[in-house]
Image (spheres, grey):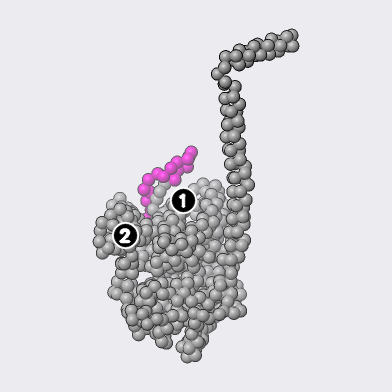
Amino acid sequence: MPSNNLYLAVVVLPLIGFFVSALFGKNLSKKVVGLIASSVIIIPFFIILKAFIGLLNGGEMIHFYLFKWFAVGHYSVNFGIQIDQLSVLMVMLITGVGSLIHLYSISYMHDDENYSNYFSYLNLFVFFMLVLVMSDNYLGMYIGWEGVALTSYLLIGFWFKNHEYNDAAKKAFVMNRVGDLGFLVGMFFVFYYTGSLEFTKVNAALGMGAMVPPLAFIASAAMFLGATGKSAQIPLFTWLPDAMAGPTPVSALIHAATMVTAGIYLIFRSNALFSLAPDTLNIIAIIGIATALYAALVGLAQNDIKKVLAYSTVSQLGLMFLAVGVGAYTTALFHVLTHGFFKALLFLGSGSVIHAMGGNQDIREMGGLKKYMPITYATFLIGSLAISGIPPFSGFFSKDEILAMAFQQNIVLWVLGVAVSMMTAFYMFRLLFLTFSGEFRGSSQEKSHLHESPLLMTVPLIVLAVLSAIAGLLGLPAVFHAPHFLNNFLSPIVVHSGEGHPHLNASTEYMLMAIATVSGIISIGLAYTKYVSKKSIPSVDTLYTGLSKWANRKFYIDEIYDFLFVRPVKWVSDFLFRVVDKLLVDGIVELSGKVSILTGNVIRSLQTGQTSFYILAMVLSICFIIGYYLIGI
């Protein structure tokens, strides 16, 4: 029991941090608030590290019930905690990267008037994210799933005085609700046919044939809809770029390492179900590569430093779904981990740049920052090399594995994946060169304030840069004749384990690695030639034409959605308001009032107070009664 309480503290400590910051933060110094908020994330990291070491040494999964949640008939739902190979990796990612982001935020948000509110929201977000990945059943996961949606709404719209930021928060919230309906439907299907919501019991029931493939297709497709909302896949992806409205550390935490990977976690956790539905996996692969390709094209023409990274996130998530779609669950999680490191690094690096630029996010007005911000530049370079798939950085290994698995499944998917990788390398180094190389293009006032960020911001950058460089060791290619750590570690969770190593001969695998590397280097060379050698710097007044214009305008997807969904809903709402509400509902209410008034007026006119009128009325009434009686006879 003491051990259970220790692991329960992993979930509870961030919740305590939320209450402390929310209730007492205004009365505490900013330094104390930041220290408490960071400590309640750092301590769980070291606790979960103990569980990781235990599992690494062959220990059993940690599973315990906290209390009976509710009971319906013979069925009861318990609120339980499950720490296995999958959840322990996710918790380490959430608390590890989350700790660095909290420390970074102490300095980044220091001058914000709602400092304590910010940390309370951040702690609450981590709490719900931990509930999501540590629950032992789908219902508990759903509570965390909805909780991160709520807190992301609060964090995206944190600077609520800006109306556009509020719109971005509402957009994220509403679009996620669409996907969440799919999760609910899938969960209901699973419960109806397996009789349980606990992961271990569901997997056992599925293994005994509780669901035939057509039913598994419906349930898995519904859950995939939920994953598309949370992990920003076509068609529910447009919320994520707009979510850059939140503070930059929020972008790093929510949109790099945690919330947006929840969809991948859901599918991985449900791999026994998805493996029964190959048609769903094919759909996931197609949606994944389409999303990756679309987002990469849009990223080529964006000029907001955070928007480039946002579309990069959508694109990388597409590659993760491609991996899932070809049945490579471990490979997808491998990229989740490496992406969590280098994308958090890139977002925090962009925050360092924005901090130095006084809030300006337009890369066309930057340039030459590497001499003012050497640490930010060096770490940003490492992150850019990692996401571009250049060896020996982490992104090379995870992306190479995705491409190798795609090559085995369908060569068209592999070709498109290579194209996405090339575009990724180009737009990331376009971003790097326009931001850090050449001469400074901003105002003289901005130039006078250029400086390297303080230690609380640069130290997390350095740590993430190291992780971005070495995380590839988690999954070395088979041709290196080294054990694939993640594949071995996660094998108890995956129904069809062994997919971590592509089944390719050595020459083919070396060829694929060479193509991916050379294509990335060529893209970097093209970006260098255009933006450094030829100094083809886009100005703020640049008019885009052709495909560039379409890419810059995000292929008008928001406008299309507005025409297809938003406007019709507004038209229907307006019709219902004017016809049903105003004419029908209000008309009935007003008519009943008018009838009451008319009836009252008639009755009141009969109450004259004159005795002669009452006698006449009495006589007439008697005559009427007698006449009615005589006629009746």
Residue marked by disc 1 = 139
Q: Are marks 2 and 1 in contact (CB under 8 Å)?
A: no
Residue 530: give x, y in percent of width and height.
50, 87
Q: Is 7 above or below relative to 433?
A: above
Q: Residue at x 44, y 66 (%)?
A: 245
Q: Which stretch appears magenta?
A: 55-77
Give residue 414's position: percent from left, percent from top. Answer: 57, 75
Secondary structure beneath dot 2 equals helix
Image quadrant of residue 607? top right
Q: Residues within 10 Å of mark 2 (few under 14, many from 20)?
A: many
Q: Is residue 74 magenta?
A: yes
User: Regarding mark 1 in the picture, which secondary structure is present there?
Assistant: helix
Q: Quadrant of the C terminus?
A: top right
Residue type at numbered disc 2: Ser
Residue wearing tag 2: 116
* Earlier-in-chain disc, 2 versus 1: 2
Residue occupying the point 45% across, 54% down: 146
Amino acid marked by disc 1 = Leu
Q: Foreground: 45 or 586? A: 586
Residue 84 image offset from top left, x and y in percent? 40, 59
Left or right: residue 606 versus residue 263 is right
Decide whether the magenta segment is chiefly helix, strand or loop: strand
**Category of crowding for the residue at label 1, using alpha-carbon neighbours closer than 10 angstroms: few (below 14), some (14–19), many (at least 20):** some
